[in-house]
Image (spheres, helix red, strand yellow):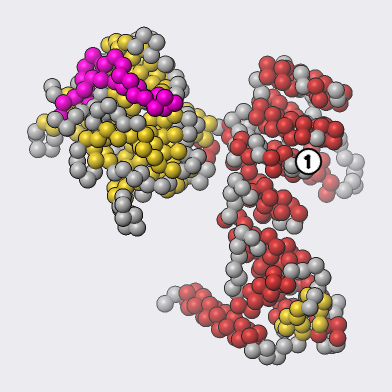
Amino acid sequence: MDPTAIKEELRLFQSTLLQDGLKELLNENRFVDCTLKVGDRCFPCHRLIMAACSPYFREIFFGEDGKEQSADANTKEVVLDDVDPNILDMIIRYLYSAEIDLTDDNVQAIFAVANRFQIPSVFTVCVNYLQQKLSLANCLAIFRLGLVLNCPRLAVAARNYIADRFDSLSEEEEFLQLAAHELFAIIGTDSLNVEREESVFEALMRWVRVDKEKRSKVLVEAFDCLRFRLMPEKYFHDKVEGDELIMANAELMKKVQEIKDAFQGKLPETKKKEPKGEGENEGEEGEEEEEEGMLPGYLNDNRRLGMYMRDLIVMVNDSATVAYDVNENECFLTAMSDQVPKNHVSICNAKNHMYIIGGLFVDEEDKTNPLQCYFYKLDTLTSDWMALPPMPSPRCLFNLGEYENLLFAIAGKDLQTNESIDSVICYDTDKMKWSETKKLPLRIHGHSVVSHKGLIYCIGGKTDDNKALNKMFVYNHKQSEWRELAGMKRPRAMFGAVVHKNKIIVSGGVNEEGLTAEAETYDFATNQWEAFTEFPQERSSVNLVSSGGSLYAVGGFALMELENKEIGPSEVTDIWQYEEDKKQWSGMLREMRYAAGSSCSAMRLNAARMPKL
């Protein structure tokens, strides 16, 4: 056995034995030599244990020379004021047993008492608990607590959590109640997850206007936390320079002029280092060097963490979620996705949130609907897929649409009966609930769905008699109504569809005649379909993606010669780009291995947060 492992095992054994012994001594009230008194409650304990766990009690029980004080009345009974006796009892029992029941209701009180009496073990347990429990509801309170109790680890963890979610938290009432130094610690950090510096300025001014008289006085200091050179010059002129509170402050207007000069390429001279006289203290040199060459904060043009967003093609399969940057030809690992089912449908909604639904989930506790579909949301901050309430209508070969905070799973094949269905089930992302909504006029599967300007379009597909359709229906959720529109020129199922430059593009697919390479485009204004440039190869299940103003086609299935020399469907994992000026498709990558078995969507992601593959 490894000697290190033996030592660790012996250490744990001795630690457990000691802890059990101490707990027994406390419970049996043996060898007790002091009492902590809070109000009318007394807590017998041992001076040695309290002194070993707390510098505060060590000073009480031992003199300045480190020698033990005589057990007089002053050390036998220690009176503690302004302490909740129940909290003190929990802390004492933890010191003897290493057991404490932390909850959201008591952790802050325990944290404060542990801080006051300098009990690092309890303090650390509380910090760990609060870090793990950080949420949108409590992060601001925990940030302030970390500052008040002078706990940098907790304050920084909470600040980073807030910085990651700045756009949503800056709208909250609690954010507007922050003290000036608390606000500046947040908006001054490089890690702020904002795409636009304008949103930081707007959050600051909302905060100032809560109490204009007092808070306008700290605007000069607040300016150093903002990076005005990252704003569009026109926005700076209209919104910053033209703000009444800023215009009323002469010192701020001087800074505004410096920023305007910086936009024109005129930066102020930075502080130059003066030569030191012989014999001067060299220890001060480091401090001066830190300041030398630094521009004022309001002229800082370093990008925030959130400003590294890119338009990417996100490929999701059952092993990993990978984002591909076409322009830079770079791949990034967005998340591992071992839990993602092979057969799934993905969607990235207008809020830039990605969801996937698919597979078969068996809920043994639900006797009414035991068979359901897995449902996940991509958390881009933790690089993980979060499980959401499973879809209660198990199906495959369906597709997804969206409207505001709603997702719609439309038609498909029932996984229990293997028959096409017309049901449409809706998920509310705010209420986190599934519900039935207006049925599709036809029972179909293998269709495509796109969403545009508050409407959902269901295109093509197959019926149970294997007949491909050219029909298109549009759903208006406000009116709870499906309406038939002009049909495609060619019936098709299992094809790619996307909204690109305010038109629907469809390509490829399969019908009674086999695979097709034909493509069509739909004009929303005229309700007409027209021919579009054919794809270079007949294939089905091609992923059409509109990203960064360009149109791409990823993967799919084509007829190819198999290993047994027969012709059959085989997956391809190439990437093509449509060249608008030449009206043609051009191959970009012959093989993108991450596209195998993947669903593809366009999404904006932060390249600085993801490891490059």
- Seen in the picture, residue 502 relative to 555 is either above or below; the reply is above
Q: Which residue is mark 1?
A: 180
**Which quadrant holds residue 233?**
top right
Q: Is residue 49 left or right of residue 399?
A: right
Residue at left offset 68%, top offset 90%: 30
**Which quadrant holds residue 497?**
top left
Image x and y of residue 595, in percent: 32, 35
Residue at left offset 21%, top offset 22%: 469
Tag 1's secondary structure? helix
Residue at left offset 39%, top offset 36%: 426
Residue 494 on the magenta segment: yes
Figure quadrant of the N terminus: bottom left
Label 1 crowd (10 A; few <14 / some 14-19 / many >=20): some
Main SS type for the magenta part?
Answer: loop
Number of numbered markers:
1
Figure quadrant of the C terminus: top left
Residue 259 on the magenta segment: no
The furthest residue to the bottom: 30
- Seen in the picture, residue 462 relative to 18 is either above or below; the reply is above
Magenta span: 466-495
Image x and y of residue 209, in percent: 77, 31
- Seen in the picture, residue 59 relative to 530 is either above or below; the reply is below
Can residue 75 be spotted in the picture?
yes
Can residue 588 be spotted in the picture?
no
Image x and y of residue 188, in percent: 71, 38
Q: Is residue 200 left or right of residue 1?
A: right
Q: Is residue 98 left or right of residue 368?
A: right
Which sits in the foreground, 309 or 415?
Answer: 415
Which sits in the foreground, 316 or 267?
Answer: 316
Which residue type carries mark 1?
Answer: Ala
**Which quadrant holds residue 83?**
bottom right
Image x and y of residue 565, in percent: 9, 34
